[in-house]
Amino acid sequence: MKKSILPNLRSLAGTAIALVFFWINGLAQCKEYVIGVKGDTLNCVDAGGLKQGPWVNRVDEIRGEPGYEEEGVYKDGQKTGTWRVFTLQGDLLGIENYRYGHKNGVQQYFNTMGDLVREESWLASNPENPVETIEVFDVNDPKKVYLVQVKLEASTVPHGLWKIYEPGTGKMLKKENYILGKLDDGTGTANGILKNKEGNADAISNETKQEPKEKAKPKEVLEFEKKNEGKKKVKMRTGQTGG
């Protein structure tokens, strides 16, 4: 008996109708939009005038400055997630990351040959609550940990390592460490700064500094201290040799 293909056709038709409905519903939320070369919806502006979803921004060459295009996602009018920057000829120039509409995290920039030439690190603040809670490790004693609340004074600040590379070889030519917008002086403790275990640094103040978490003493040490409590002098072996 020949098997009927009618049920399969009905299923495919139902799926197609659902996809068309979803597409039309998405377009209905856009006051303005364009259709990309792949048939996808781009550059959506919602009824409130806010940019939403995938976007392509184009800046033409002007006054000798080369133009560029950038591709990424907007959420409620703010850049979010990973954006890519291209020359007008299609060469990748940069990979940028955004939070709250501002640069956040590691940013990478390339020359037209595809060589990585610069890396930047940024920290963006939440405009509704520009306070970041950060774990900070004491530079003099990495066993001590501080929970620090730092209020950022700008929407985004350089924070972390910035690196310059030699095109072609990838050799690092320069490295700088920024701490909440200020260049690290190299000490890690100046102006109330403590370096953490990754080598980055974070601001810390007397008002926000909490008591460090001390590492628990070994059981043998506790037993030794209890056994010799109250004694004026306790003879100990230190492993030292000579005079």
Image (cartoon, grey):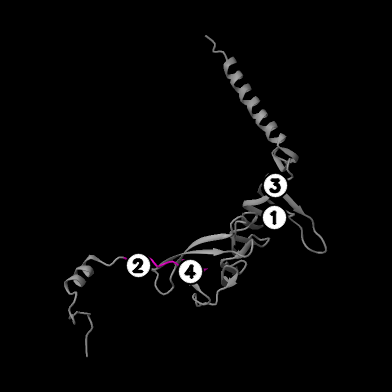
Earlier sequence position, callout 4 versus callout 2: 4
Q: CA distance from mark 4 to mark 1?
A: 32 Å
Can residue 31 be seen here? yes
Q: Residue at x 50, y 78 (%)?
A: 187
Q: The magenta stretch spans which residues? A: 198-215
Q: Amino acid at mark 2?
A: Glu
Mark 2 highlights which residue? 214
Instruction: Tell me the SS state at disc 2.
Output: loop
Q: Residue at x 64, y 61 (%)?
A: 155
Residue 8, image x, y percentages: 58, 19
Q: Amino acid at mark 1?
A: Phe
Q: Contact (CB < 8 A) between labels 1 and 3? A: no
Mark 1 highlights which residue? 86
Q: Nearer the viewer, mark 4 or mark 1?
A: 4
Tell me where residue 7 sits by quadrant. top right
The image's mark for residue 55 is 3
